[in-house]
Amino acid sequence: MAYFHLGELIHRRAEEYGSKTAIKYQVKTSRKKWKDLSWKAFSERVLKLAHAMAEIGVEPGDKIGIYSENMAEYLITDFGAFANRAVMVPMYATASISQVEYIVNDAHTKVIFVGEQYQYNQAYKVQSESKVLNQLIIFDNNVVLNRDDKTSMYFSDFLTTGQNEQAHALVNVRLKQLKETDLATIIYTSGTTGVPKGVMLLHSSYNQAFRIHDMRLTTLSSKDISMCFLPLTHIFEKTWTYYCLHKGMTIAVNKDPRQIQETIKQIRPTLMSSVPRFWEKVYAGVNDKISSSKGLMKKIYAHSIETGRRYNLDYRNEGIKPPQWLSIKFKFYQATVFYLLKYIVGINKGNVFPCAGAPLSDKINIFLQSVDIPIIYGYGLTETTATVTCFPLIGFKIGTVGTVMPEVDVKIGDNNEILVKGLTVMDGYYNKPDETAAVFTSDGYFRTGDAGYLTENGELVLTERIKDLYKTSNGKYIAPQMIETLLSEDIYIDMVAVIGDERKFVSALIVPNYEALKEYAKEHSIGYASIEDLVAHKDIQDFMYERIELKQVDFTSFEKIKNFTLLPEPFSIETDELTNTLKLKRKVILEKYGVEIERMYTL
């Protein structure tokens, strides 16, 4: 298959697939209705968008922001910008004003495409005080503009502004000048201090990602349909969706992640990239069904799962022909029990389901493989254009994150750090030469910040994270030190230990300023017999909740502390929770307060 610069990809595929559906998207008035956009129409809208961008003065190399949930317009914008050799700078739809402002100023973003009312309101506040941001283009026509807004345009109107010879000529010239060395995207990721870093990825990096996935995922074709579920700001979804378009597939755009359980049943995709949290929910749901069953049905479930495990893992995955009796039983369960379970979820037409972004439990992985859900588990980073390793279709090893992708070079460095080299590795961090230099070895390998080892068969096993950065089970990064530092500014808070690594949400162990809290209790006539009684008192809990919530106003939803525990005793050097320089000993705290932590996730 030919590989094209992203600026021309959609048009080349439109020549090949014409009236075939490229994108399915939800009707705004009904989540249950979907519209189809053909490859030909997709190509035409991308060109209209490119012409409109040229008309307002977008130049090659300009940074174009996009601040939206997943929409068909999102993809049209991406590829319209690429046709102008412009650079896309995505922002999460939940990003706070301060985060948008930082990215606008750092990337010098003059134009932002926004999704709905929330994004418009946030972006307009940034624009009102910005010397950089000049204009907002709004996807949703239902957005109500600020009465003082004289510059914003709705996307549907914007598309018509470039219908003139000059704009057409500019885009035609730029399409002729496309280079693989063009910068395609700057994707901002949080560092350990909470200061975002813009990862620069070239068009050549995306093209190389397509090539190596073609080599690894040989069962995929233009007949597949992929559900675009994760935010397109996420490198996993972005690269996967671009790859599916490269293959000529249909992309079904899921707008609201909270609706995925409904929309996946409407589309019944053959492919969907996701983080482990999605499969954790599937596992929990299926287990609830099995647990609630009785008698013969419960035995059938247990027997079918064991049959599937033996067939898929002990034989098929090992390249061994299964016994005829096992094949017969498996085929029976595949057509009955497994099909029913998958049909209920909406994945009964599944081809493969890539999963990455956070650790996936071996127990859950084995279960999914046993009930005939083809999970392709992998590992990657924004800085490596996603995939570094993933399961092969046959011969994968549970407990690993798969084998190294073709033409990617991985070796283990000091402190067992995983080092990566290849054409998918980033061009550097935008505006941060010192940080860029720090993450590359003298011989050009990227330092991932993750530790692990390679098995004799070339599989990668992750052991721990070197970098002080948490990743929730939803695949979102959080910087604990940034959150802890901000909360500790409160006069009623002494110290904070943020919890969240591989968890569903962020929680915290909080050491209050006991004297300040006693004074508050006195002023509000709150009685207590001990410090234990004080921190457990409902009025104190409510008071602290208010202070913590207001402190988090600029955090995105996945960074916010959802639950907390007020501790009756402080962290100290003597009890080994603090180092001699008063830094948290996280491992010690996790072990010592294990009961309290687990309680926060079971309430």
Image (cartoon, rainbow, N blue to C red):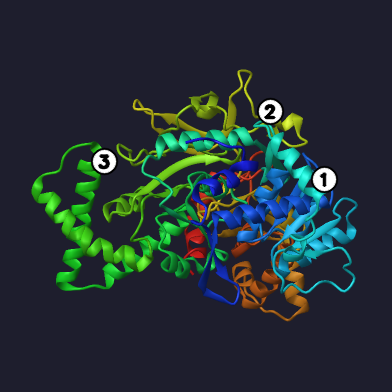
Q: What is the number of the mark on residue 481?
A: none
Question: Farthest residue toward the left?
Answer: 325
Image x and y of residue 103, in percent: 76, 49
Q: How far apart are marks 1 and 2 (CA)?
A: 24 Å
Reading the image, the residue beneath label 1 is 108
> What is the distance, in whole Å, between disc 3 and disc 1 at their CAs?
50 Å
Q: Is residue 496 visible?
A: no
Residue lying at the far top in this picture: please name it: 443
How many labels, in total?
A: 3
* Front residue of 311 and 84: 84
* Amino acid type at image mark 3: Asn
Q: Mark 2 points at which residue?
A: 438
Query: Which quadrant of the structure image shows residue 266?
Result: bottom left
Residue 119: horizontal and vertical position, in percent? 73, 64
Pick the front one: 225 or 597: 225
Q: What element carries label 2?
A: helix
The amino acid marked with disc number 1 is His
Residue at disc 1, secondary structure? loop
Q: Are marks 1 and 2 in contact (CB under 8 Å)?
A: no
Q: Check the image and report above or below for 247 versus 518.
A: above
Of 150 and 121, the residue lying toward us: 150
Q: Relative to residue 405, is residue 500 depicted above or below? A: below
Picture disc at residue 317: 3
Q: Which of marks 1 and 2 is nearer the N terminus?
A: 1
- Vertical position of residue 351 compared to residue 35: above or below: above
Looking at the image, which residue is at 46% across and 70% down?
262
Q: Earlier in the sequence, mark 3 or mark 2?
A: 3
